[in-house]
Image (cartoon, coloured by chain):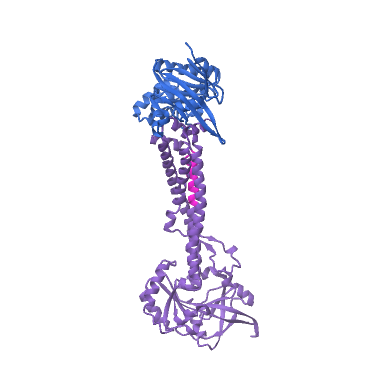
Amino acid sequence: MTNNPIITTEKLIKKFPMGKGEFLALKGIDLEFNEGEFAGLIGPSGSGKTTLLNIIGSLDTPSEGEAMVLGQPVSQLTARQAAQLRKEKLGFIFQSYNLLAVHTVFENVEFPLLLLKYTPSQRQKMVMDALEWVGLTDKVNSKPPALSGGECQRVAIARAMVKKPMVVLADEPTANLDAANSHNILKTMEMLNKELKTTFLFATHDEKVISYLHRKIFLIDGKIDRDELIK
Amino acid sequence: MIKFLLKGLVRDKSRSWIPTLVVAVGVMLSVFLHAYITGFMNETIEMNAQFFNGHVKVVTRAYADEISQIPNDLALLETDILVNQLKVQFPDVQWFERIHFGGLVDAPDSLGETKTQGPAMGMAVDLLSPTKNEVQRLNLYKSLVRGNLPQKPDDILISDFFAQKLRVNPGDTITFIGSTMNNAMAYHNFVISGTLSFGAMALDRGAMIADIEAVRFALDMENAAGEIVGFLPAGFYSSKVAHAMQSDFNKVADETDVFSPVMLTFEDQGDMATFVNLAHYMGAIITGIFMLAMSLVLWNAGLLGGLRRYGEIGIRLAMGEEKVHVFSTMIYESLMIGIAGSILGTSLGLFFAWLLQTYGLDISATMKGASIMMPTVIRARITTADYFIGFIPGVVSTLIGTALAGIGIFKRQTARLFKELET
């Protein structure tokens, strides 16, 4: 980890319309994440962790305040610029894997590289490298329905990591996995964090995930309750 | 990228094969229905043309004014010359002299006293010429129920229904009582050679068909005929061709002479113009309604197809694919499905329409007692429009459905899509 902030949020507020009024999901969040962090937003449902992750991932915009992600102000990005940021610099891992069921493991992992217009030979090497990181080189031609939950999530990690993004955002990545698979996945991500210096940012309330985090940011009702750095 | 999307399209049956089949079925039905309606309406026109109106008809100006009365006293004279002139002027058209006549038919008993009587409507056509053109045109072979076709000038065919009503059989003699073209009383004995069933009550109620020479003799109409009917070489009525012929023929007609021959088109007779227009618009209206219904189905299919792919679209957006690109790929996919489905559906629709056009569907059993002239064999008719009409619901509706679904996705906030993706 370096002392080089790549994500900062300043007085971040997010409001959602609710009936005739508004629901305040984030109530002035000030945060800073350095390159190579393995951090987590922890809190119960409705605490605002996913909302914050979506804003950092340029999937949503703040109502007030600003989020600077890799030097870019999220609230001022056009749809095209936001897509560009996600395409080049961010990786996503979801709770329910969200793999494309009709495509093979190879094709699922290859997809982000197609958007980045890599050549076929580059794609071949990069996909195989990513599958090697997650230990799935023997499953290149399998399709997601033929894989276990743990294998699917490992494919999702490979897909998020294949383009070597600067930041990976993982929303409840172990929610659908058993304990053994959860530890397996977390070890893989921890290994990638160390080897590739990729920043990992989790949204979770899973104790297993929390136990792996190097930094724990507890959110309650849209506010930071405490921010713990684990040595 | 294109290869990647095509792979997904081909592998995901619910995204490719099933929508293609839905489109194909819709297009097939649209094409078939259009050909069927065109065929049915044209068959009805043709049936009326064959029996009564011809595609064009030459009569005297006075006869034309009173045509509903069948005024044989205003018939054409020296028709042999006129027919020859017509054959020279319009060599591709088939011309036939006909006389429509009405009167009373008297059926005697064995003592020669009246057994039964009934009003009859007759048509005199050329039954005895070696070419048998009129016999074939009126489909008399197939309509024959009992007996034979006329072999001698005084032989006559009457409808089987009428024969039963008069209690006469083939071989019996009947007496026709009517009026000559000079308005004198006419009597003539005919021998029933056979009975007919036309399948339309309008004809079966009291129709008789006799050879024109015998009727000329009976009605004192030597070398005369009520009308000369013409049939176009294409075998079906064409308003454009008929009107062109009419203008050509009538431009030399003497407007001051009520007995000068004038040409009428099929549409100039009775309510036939309304029927021709109805045939024209009815086909378009019914097909339009059906295509609208099919469009809604296909639109819905496109919409569902788009909505079903929320998950995939959410992922693609998260990976950094632009919304415009996602939207355009959806449109291209639906275009491919629409075109493939339309080609398949048009081929199938044309095949079934061809079967119905070639072999026909005999509905004579259901037509017994019908009081209007309708064909007893339903035939489709394939026209140029059938080759492309299916592409309207097939391509356009699928495209609109997908576009609407895409716009819904397009307008949705990415984060909202994501939330829906996760639930």
Residue B23 is one of the magenta-drawn residues? yes
Query: Quick check: A148 above or below B343?
Result: above
Residue B186 drawn at (x, y percent) = 55, 86
Q: In the depicted view, which residue is nearer to us: B101 or A206?
A: A206
Please say whether residue B124 is visible from this viewpoint.
yes
- Left or right: B327, with B193 as reference point: left
Q: Is residue A148 visible?
A: no
Q: Position of residue A92 (x, y in %)?
A: 45, 26
- In the rendered image, which quarter contains the N terminus of chain B? top left
Give the main secondary structure of the magenta stretch: helix
The colour with which the image depicts chain B is: purple
Q: Please tell me whether residue B272 is drawn above or below residue B182 in the rendered image.
A: above
Count how many numbered circles sit on residues in the image: 0
x and y percentages locating residue B233 in the rendered image: 40, 68
Q: Which chain is blue?
A: A
For the magenta stretch, what is the residue range?
Answer: B13-28
